Amino acid sequence: MPTPDEPTPLPERSPGTRRWLFADQLGPHFLDAPRQPVLLVESVDVFRRGRFHRRKAHLILSALRHRAAELGDQAVFVRARTYREGLAECGEPVSVCDPTSYVARRFVRRLDDVEVLASRGFVVSEAQFAHWAHQRGDKRLLMEDFYRDVRRHHGLLMDGEKPVGGSWNYDHDNRQGPPRKRTSLDVREPWWPVEDEIDEEVRADLDRWERDEGVEFTGVDGPRRFAVTRREALRGLRRFLTDRLEQFGVYEDAMLTQDPWMSHSLLSAPMNLGLLDPVEVARRAEEHGRAHDVRLASVEGFVRQVVGWRSYTWHLYWHLGEDYKRRNALGARTELPQWFADLDADAVEANCLHHVLAGVRDEGWVHHIPRLMVLGNWGLQRGYHPGDLADWFWRNFVDGYDWVMTTNVVGMSQHADHGVLATKPYASGGAYIDRMSDFCGGCRYDPKVRVGQDACPFTAGYWNFLAGHREQLEGNRRMTQALRGLDRLRDLDGVLHQESERGSGPP
């Protein structure tokens, strides 16, 4: 992936200035020298721009304060109402790596005495991706092609010029449902951090903000689950590689009611705080896999998430432009209902949605399949506005940022871009959820029933969605079989009437 010539490239190094680090730029690779002076600004106004999950606020503040404590007198740490006030208090020129949202990038470019550097923390630069996209001409920007080129570029999971094992992708080996008659996987628990006095101080400040300063949060508080320092992040990575990677791929798409973590790494949050570099993570996974003969499909599946999908969605966020978030190809206009916005899982009877929404409420995290096939699937079927849903995701998930959720929700989940990211909508009925989880066994609804008191809201909602968008989907070859199924439904009129009467209340 060669870098194209650019008329006004952003500089890549500025070791002579104090480095302003945002809260998602906390790793050593965001500095140009080990002893480079640093500025950290904690702004309370950030948390007044919308309701964030309490655990997300705790994680961000804890990470900032731990980084300040690590750096000691190397850092100026300012607590201020706004970033602008924090910069004024610092009182000297600073450099900053390009931030991770359109709003933040516009802000830093308007500031005096701030040198803006190229972004960091991803497997290729924005300039390299732009060159790759330009070279493809009219061809679709497929994630699989990007992923293969990234592996060639970095020499990841390669045997010379060929992929390890002879195949680039082992996704077909990573689609098992959960083990039957088991409530959890037989793997060691993830590594959990131990809170310290900094976490206690953060929690007290959040209590005060809620009580005295009008800051509102969603979700509930609880013990910190995710790493906020590089040392913690490396410990979490080691635990995942030694005890959990082997089974990661096997069950990466499966869901269990009593096992929210499954074999997942829980590294998305520290990676998105900038504590781990993705190429570093992928190399460690490859080295461990080769040294310990770990199941190749699991190693490849993990590497694909870290250096493939994660960086692909990052680059598309910038490549597709700020207007991408306003795309709405399916004309979804429904406002997020209050029970959903408030994470009111107790109002929900459908077992899958109840447990997943409770996971968001209690932990600020569920893994990618509940996000896509329960929460996203529900929003798609009910016509939630895609931009509003993307905002809900990034505010309520500890690993959520605008760049993460815009492409994943607007494109992948809600198909609002009409197929730029995904070739078909990720809509499914209760049968998929039943196959990939144990949710349906204890549910008052039946995934096989479409109409009546026992009708599964996901099954009925699936057929209602297809019927309502038939004209828009008929040109999609991957939807041909599903749309033909509509013509075989003798009770379709009953389904449509039932769903029109359901309204926006919890299922």
Image (cartoon, rainbow, N blue to C red):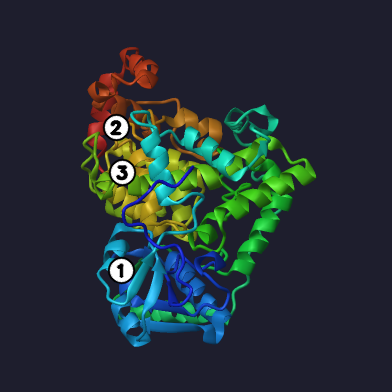
> Which residue position holds label 3?
320
Quick check: 320 above or below 22? Answer: above
Left/right placement of residue 38 relative to residue 466 reads right
Q: Nearer the viewer, mark 3 or mark 2?
A: 3
Tag 1 near tag 3, CB within 8 Å: no
Q: Tag 2's secondary structure? A: loop
Q: Earlier in the sequence, mark 3 or mark 2?
A: 3
Q: Position of residue 31 (x, y in %)?
A: 51, 70
Q: Position of residue 35 (x, y in %)?
A: 56, 78
> Which residue position holds label 2?
418
**Residue 18 image-quadrant placement:** bottom left
Left/right placement of residue 331 relative to residue 426 reads left
Residue type at mark 1: give it. Val
Q: Position of residue 231 (x, y in %)?
A: 64, 68
Where does the C terminus fall, quadrant-wise? top left
Tag 2 near tag 1, CB within 8 Å: no
Instruction: Give the residue at x 31% y 13%.
Output: 487
**Residue 136 image-quadrant placement:** top left
Count numbered badges in the picture: 3
Distance from disc 3 to disc 2, alpha carbons, whole Å, reads: 13 Å
Quick check: 287 above or below 450? Answer: below
Quick check: 421 above or below 471? Answer: below
Label 2 Cα crowd, 10 Å radius (few <14 / some 14-19 / many 20+): many
Label 3 Cα crowd, 10 Å radius (few <14 / some 14-19 / many 20+): few
Residue type at mark 2: give it. His
Instruction: Give the residue at x 63% y 39%.
Output: 300
Q: Tag 3's secondary structure? A: loop
Q: Nearer the viewer, residue 481 or 272?
A: 272
**Residue 156 image-quadrant placement:** top right
Q: Which mark is residue 108?
A: 1
Q: Nearer the viewer, residue 35 or 239?
A: 35
